[in-house]
Amino acid sequence: QVIATNLHLTGGAIDLRAVRWDRSRSRLSGESQGPAGVQYRIAIYVPRGFRPVSDTVREVSARLVEMEQTFPSSGRLQWQVDFVPAR
């Protein structure tokens, strides 16, 4: 679940174009739109019993990770975070 983003005070209502949870792949993915070249951060809730496997996220707390990427020249960013069962 996306908690918030850094682009707007609404926490993603303006920049998040799509967010999807693929249960069969345990994958959270989406599309965001923003100014080219701008650093973009998405705060993501980590479901109980899972851990993220992505080199684009850093752990903030036991249940929260942050993904940081830069908007490409098109201004549209496709992103995803895969999850695996926690050990």
Image (cartoon, rainbow, N blue to C red):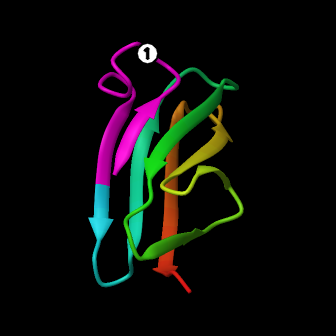
Q: Residue at x 60, y 46 (%)?
A: 67
Q: In the structure shown, which secondary structural element does the residue marked by tag 1 occupy?
A: loop
Q: Could you tell whether 39 is left or right of 51 in the image?
A: right
Closer-to-camera residue (62/14) = 62
Q: Residue at x 44, y 60 (%)?
A: 46
Q: Quadrant of residue 10?
A: top left
Q: Amino acid at mark 1?
A: His
Q: Is residue 1 above or below residue 76?
A: below
* Magenta range: 1-19
The quarter of the image holding the C terminus is bottom right
Residue 52 image point, x, y percent: 55, 68
Question: Mark 1 packing: few (<14 Cα in 10 Å), some, or many (20+)?
Answer: few
Q: Is residue 13 magenta?
A: yes
Residue 44 image point, x, y percent: 46, 48
The residue carrying mark 1 is: 8
Q: How many marks?
A: 1
Q: Is residue 5 magenta?
A: yes
Q: Is residue 16 above or below residue 55?
A: above
Residue 15 image point, x, y percent: 39, 27
Q: Is residue 15 above or below residue 42?
A: above
Q: Could you tell whether 31 is left or right of 34 in the image?
A: left
Q: Residue at x 66, y 23 (%)?
A: 38
Closer-to-camera residue (87/44) = 87
Residue 72 image point, x, y percent: 64, 36
Q: Residue at x 38, y 81 (%)?
A: 25
